[in-house]
Amino acid sequence: MTELEQATGSTMADLMSAAAERFGDKVAVRAKRDGEWSELTYGEVGAIVDEIASGLIELGLQPGERACVLANTRPEWTFASFGISSAGGVVVPIYPTNSPKECQWVAGDSAAKVVFAEDADQAAKIAKVRDELPDLEHVVLIEGEAEGAITLDELRAKGRESDHADEVASRRSDVSEDDPYTIIYTSGTTGNPKGVVLTHGNAGSVSAVIHEVDLVSGDDVTYLYLPMAHVFALICVLGAIDIGAPIVYFGGDTKQIVAELSETKPTYFPSVPRIFEKIYTLVTSNTYKETLAKAV
């Protein structure tokens, strides 16, 4: 693999740790909490990912085993994903809009050992089908509490208290370009969703495209609202981290996208045509113009 193909890390397993070392104090993440924007540097995110990876090893996750992420677009989705990869695991996204039975299909078909669930509502979907998931051993809750689950904070604490730093480093170095990085389930045309396996080398080729077309630079700011269970959002995140660009995660309400764009002033806004149409309609409306004029 050439320097152009992967500028920061050799695989997705060491991409974040390499970015943390390379970009250090540079802002990696901006997110809205309690109405205020907060920031984390690449160094801070790297430390969080290390804790999650160590925590997963403490829970018993083995290299090559699968772990699902069932959550809306938020920083913790990224943290969990890189933690799984750093522990040598395979990331399996689940759409947060999926029904319990749909969640069961993805988690069961991939033989997932761990599921990261956003909150008690998402964890409840897994609880309803837990008897149909014989391989599932742990549910990790990103926020809140739920019976039969540990919290993300507790997982990170396990990682801090364990002595797995060398094991994490070893697992990262053992991951090869040909190893599975993620299994993305698509709807297809008939039957249950099919799992599409993307290797670390396949995902790393995103960096080649980013550099070749000069799509974004380290000085750009990406605003992300796209569902992270979709490959479009995935490549946006990987491309940004590879070059050390900050990512602004939307606050969770699509009705606030325009307001948040105004607040954060991103230079790169990956989206789909329908959203651009809605934004255009809004900003060209008389009501919006009148509101903007009063604010000025």
Image (cartoon, rainbow, N blue to C red):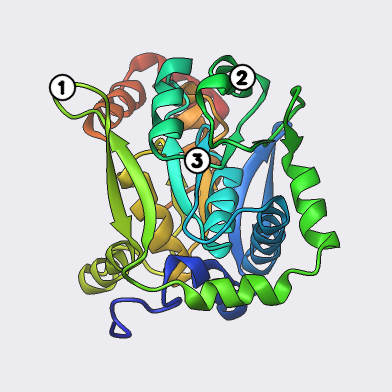
Q: Residue at x 85, y 61 (%)?
A: 161
Q: Secondary structure at mark 1?
A: loop
Above or below, comparing residue 49 to residue 15 in the picture: above
Left or right: 128 as drawn, with respect to 283: right
Tell which residue pokes out farthest to the right in this image: 161
For the residue carrying disc 1, how many other residues have a C-alpha within 10 Å: few (<14), some (14-19), or many (20+)? few
The residue lying furthest to the left in this view is: 189
Q: Which residue type carries mark 2? A: Ala
State the mark number for residue 25: none
Which mark is on residue 190? Answer: 1
**Which residue is labeled 2 in the image?**
127
Depth check, front residue: 285 or 197: 197
Residue 112 circle label: 3
What amino acid does circle 3 point to? Answer: Ala
Residue 98 position by quadrant: top left
Is 194 displayed left or right of 229 in the figure?
left
Q: CA distance from mark 1 to mark 2?
A: 27 Å
- x, y percentage for residue 144? 75, 27
Camera-side residue: 74 or 60?
60
Answer few, some or many: residues within 10 Å of disc 2's Cα (few below 14, many 20 plus, some between 14 and 19). Answer: many
Name the side, left or right, on which 214 lies relative to 96: left
Q: Quadrant of residue 205?
A: bottom left
Is the residue 118 above or below the residue 31 in the image?
above
